[in-house]
Image (cartoon, rainbow, N blue to C red):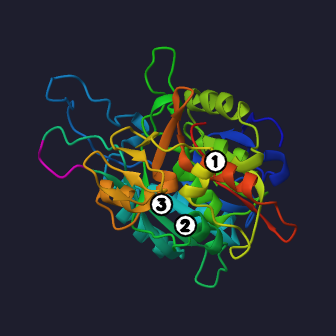
C-alpha cells in the first residue's frame, strides 16, 4: 500500500487507484460527488449523531463530563439533519458497487432516522447489530437508563445484491457457534488506543474501538477491497483496513482529525503471522485446541489468574482446563465468562486475558501458539484473515 497522503477534493471524477489509502479533505457530500459510480467495495459511516445536548453535563462530584458538543454534531433542526442524511446516503449508494457492503453506526439520537432514510434510498437492510459497550459512560443525572449500546446497520445496495459474508469464518471465531447480531460485547475506545493531543485531551469525541471495526471489516469484505469512510475522524477505519490488508479512502474536513489520522495510519503495517494474514483451514480441517491442551503444552500454567480486559472479573486456571471463580464456581472459560457478564453465551477465548509484560493479552493468542506447536499446518487450506488480538 502507498503511504497515506492528504489530497484536496476537485470537481472532476477521481481515478480510484489514485485516491486509495488517502484522506480527502472536504465536505463528504461534495467529495463523494467526485468519486466514480459503483467503485467502492464497502462503506463504513459514523455520521454525526445530532445529540442536541443542552447545558453543561457534570458528574456527582461536580466535575465536567467531556460529552459530544462538537460543532459538526449540531444541526438547527431535525429537518436539516434529515436533508443532510438523505444527501450523503444518495452519494454513498451511487458509488457503492452492486454487491458492496454498507455499514452505518449510530445512537438512539439518530439511527432510526438514518435507517428509514436508507430504506427510502433503496438500500436493503440485512441486519441491525447491537454493539454493547463493556464500559459505558454512566447516566450522571439519574434520569434515564444508562446508554450502554449503539446500533449498527448492515445493508446492501439493493435486495438483489449478493453480499460478501464470511459465515464460516465468523462461526469458527465464535467457537463453532453462529455469530449473533444482538450482543457484540466490545469496550469503548480507551487507554493507549485513544488518540490524545498535546494537552492530553482526546482528539475525537466519538473515536470507535479498533475491535469493532475489525469485526465489521472481516465479516463483509475481502483482502484488497476498497473501504470508504465519509466521516473519517480519528482514522480507525483506515488503520484497521490497512492492518487487515484492505485499502481505504477517508473523507474529513477538519485538519486536526486529518493530521492525527494520517500519523496514526502511517505507523500501521499490514499484519502477518497469527494476528493478520495467515492460512486459515476449512472449518472441518482446522484442529481444535482446548485450554487443557494449552496448559499441557506449557504455554499457560495452572494457578495463573485470568481477568476480563478491564480487570473487573478474575478467575484461576485449574489443572483440569476449567476456571475457578473466587466464590468457588468451577466452569469452562466460556460458561464462566457468560456467567460473569450475565450473558446467554460468551466466547471465553476472547473474553479472558492474562497479564504478560505489564499488559493484558487475550487468551486466544495463547491458543493460537498452542495450535502451531501441536499441529502441522496442512496444505489444503483457504486463505482467510484472523482478527488482530490484544492491544495495538
Q: Answer with left or right where residue 195 lies relative to residue 281.
A: left
Q: Give the position of the C terminus as an image quadrant.
A: top right
- Relative vertical location of residue 54 with respect to residue 51 in this rendering, above or below: above
Q: Answer with left or right where residue 131 lies relative to residue 173.
A: left
* Contact between labelled residues 3 and 2, with CB atoms less than 8 Å apart: yes
Q: Answer with left or right where residue 265 lies relative to residue 235.
A: right
Camera-nearest label, 3 or 1 = 3
Any part of residue 57 in sight: yes
Q: Residue at x 61, y 64 (%)?
A: 219
Give the numbered dot on residue 388. 1
- Relative vertical location of residue 181 with respect to residue 266 in this rendering, above or below: below
Along the polypeptide, which appears first: circle 1 or circle 2?
2
- Foreground residue, 370 or 94? 370
Secondary element under disc 1, as helix, strand or loop, is: loop
Pointer 1 local density, CA inside 10 Å: few below 14, some 14–19, many at least 20: many
Camera-nearest label, 1 or 2 = 2
Picture quadrant of residue 371: bottom right
The residue to which callout 2 is attached is 175
- Foreground residue, 331 or 388? 331
- Foreground residue, 62 or 297? 297
- Magenta residue span: 142-146
Pointer 2 local density, CA inside 10 Å: few below 14, some 14–19, many at least 20: some
Q: Residue at x 58, y 83 (%)?
A: 159
Amino acid at each position: 500500500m502507498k503511504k497515506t497522503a492528504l489530497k484536496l477534493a476537485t470537481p472532476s471524477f477521481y481515478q480510484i487507484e489514485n485516491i486509495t489509502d488517502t484522506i480527502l479533505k472536504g465536505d463528504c457530500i461534495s467529495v463523494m460527488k467526485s468519486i466514480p459510480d459503483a467503485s467502492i467495495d464497502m462503506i463504513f459511516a459514523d455520521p454525526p449523531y445530532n445529540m442536541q445536548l443542552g447545558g453543561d453535563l457534570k458528574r456527582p462530584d461536580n466535575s465536567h463530563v467531556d460529552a459530544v458538543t462538537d460543532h459538526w454534531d449540531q444541526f438547527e433542526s431535525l429537518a436539516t439533519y434529515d436533508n443532510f442524511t438523505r444527501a450523503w446516503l444518495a452519494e454513498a449508494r451511487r458509488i457503492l458497487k452492486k454487491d458492496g457492503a454498507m455499514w452505518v453506526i449510530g445512537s438512539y439520537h439518530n439511527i432510526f432516522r438514518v435507517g428509514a432514510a436508507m430504506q427510502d434510498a433503496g438500500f436493503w437492510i440485512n441486519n441491525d447489530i447491537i454493539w454493547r459497550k463493556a464500559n459505558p459512560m454512566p447516566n450522571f443525572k439519574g434520569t434515564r437508563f444508562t446508554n450502554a449500546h449503539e446500533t449498527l446497520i448492515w445493508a446492501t445496495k439493493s435486495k438483489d445484491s449478493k453480499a460478501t459474508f464470511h459465515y464460516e469464518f465468523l462461526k469458527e471465531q465464535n467457537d463453532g457457534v453462529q455469530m449473533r447480531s444482538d450482543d457484540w460485547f466490545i469496550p469503548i475506545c480507551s487507554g493507549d488506543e485513544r488518540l490524545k493531543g498535546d494537552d492530553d485531551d482526546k482528539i475525537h469525541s466519538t473515536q470507535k474501538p479498533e475491535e469493532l471495526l475489525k469485526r465489521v471489516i472481516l465479516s463483509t469484505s475481502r483482502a484488497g477491497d476498497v473501504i470508504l469512510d465519509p466521516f473519517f475522524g480519528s482514522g480507525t477505519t483506515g488503520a484497521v483496513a490497512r492492518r487487515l490488508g484492505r485499502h481505504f479512502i477517508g473523507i474529513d474536513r477538519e485538519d486536526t482529525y486529518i493530521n492525527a489520522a494520517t500519523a496514526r495510519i502511517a505507523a500501521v503495517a499490514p499484519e502477518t503471522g497469527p494476528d493478520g494474514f495467515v492460512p486459515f483451514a476449512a472449518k472441518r480441517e482446522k484442529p481444535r485446541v482446548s485450554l487443557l491442551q494449552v496448559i499441557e503444552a506449557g504455554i499457560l500454567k495452572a494457578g495463573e489468574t485470568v481477568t476480563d480486559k478491564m480487570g473487573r472479573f478474575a478467575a484461576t486456571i485449574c489443572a483440569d482446563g476449567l476456571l475457578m471463580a473466587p466464590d468457588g464456581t468451577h466452569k469452562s472459560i466460556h460458561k464462566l465468562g457468560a456467567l460473569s457478564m450475565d450473558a446467554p453465551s460468551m466466547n471465553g477465548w476472547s473474553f479472558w486475558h492474562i497479564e504478560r509484560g505489564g499488559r493484558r493479552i487475550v487468551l486466544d493468542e495463547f491458543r493460537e501458539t498452542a495450535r502451531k506447536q501441536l499441529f502441522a499446518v496442512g496444505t489444503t487450506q483457504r486463505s482467510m484473515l484472523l482478527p488482530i488480538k490484544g492491544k495495538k
